[in-house]
Amino acid sequence: MMLKVVLACLLVSVTCAKDIRIELTGNYYFSTDIKSWYDARIFCSNNNLELASVQDEAEASLIQSLAPAQGIYWTSGTDLNNPNGNFFWSSGAAIEHSNPMWAAGEPNDYLTAGTEVCVSINTNTGKIQDSLFWEQYKYICESV
Ligand SMILES: [Ca+2]
Ligand SMILES: [Ca+2]
């Protein structure tokens, strides 16, 4: 499906204003700039990608190994539109609180202010955390 869309865009590129060309590393695009979670999500979408969903520790390790620079990157994880603390990847998979990918003590905001609604990954550790959505971080887009 994705391939068909890409091929269609190659053939009729004038009709595909959203098909901004960016270079993938494996299935991922690692940004060098920083954006809020919302703006990062829009950027990925405009490139026919999604913010990355990190399905397990193996994928977290893969992301760590592929990242051209280590640091904090936005992922697709969020509890927006869900009860506070019920985090999901855009793939639809739940991120249970028992998930070993959470950094120690994370997620740590859902019981109080509830403003850390988006999930970032620290590629130094491979661990995830809930973060303030307006923070400006690098971000990872994934082809889906
Ligand atoms: Ca993924
Ligand atoms: Ca947090």
Image (cartoon, grey):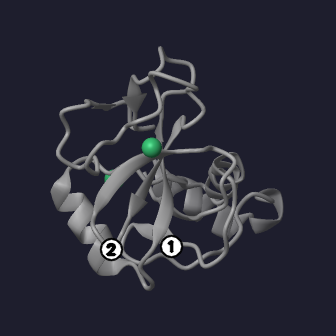
99 on left or right of 45: left
**Front one among 47 and 88:** 88
Q: What element carries label 2?
A: loop
**Front one among 20 and 60:** 60
Mark 2 surroundings: few (<14), some (14-19) or many (≥20) residues within 10 A: few
Which label lies toward us, 1 or 2?
2
Query: x and y percent of residue 67 in the render?
Result: 39, 78
- Amino acid type, mark 2: Asn
Q: What element carries label 1?
A: strand
Q: What's the residue at 76%, 58% (across, down)?
A: 16
Q: What's the residue at 46%, 26% (across, down)?
A: 110
Query: x and y percent of residue 127 in the render?
Result: 29, 57
Where is mark 1, residue-wise? 30
Q: What's the residue at 39%, 31% (across, down)?
A: 88
Residue 67, compared with residue 103, is above or below; it is below
Q: Which mark is residue 22?
A: none
| Quarter of the figure with residue 92 | top left
Q: Earlier in the sequence, mark 1 or mark 2?
A: 1
State the residue lying farthest toward the bottom.
68
Label 1 – label 2 distance at C-alpha: 14 Å
| Quarter of the figure with residue 48 | bottom right
Mark 1 CB near ligand 1 (8 Å cut): no
Task: Say if mark 1 contacts mark 2, CB within 8 Å.
Answer: no
19 on left or right of 88: right
Residue 81, compared with residue 105, is above or below; it is above
State the residue lying farthest toward the top.
83
| Quarter of the figure with residue 143 | bottom left
- Amino acid type, mark 1: Phe
Where is mark 2, residue-wise? 124
Of the four image quadrants, the one with ligand 2 is top left
112 on left or right of 57: right
Query: x and y percent of residue 66 in the render?
Result: 33, 79
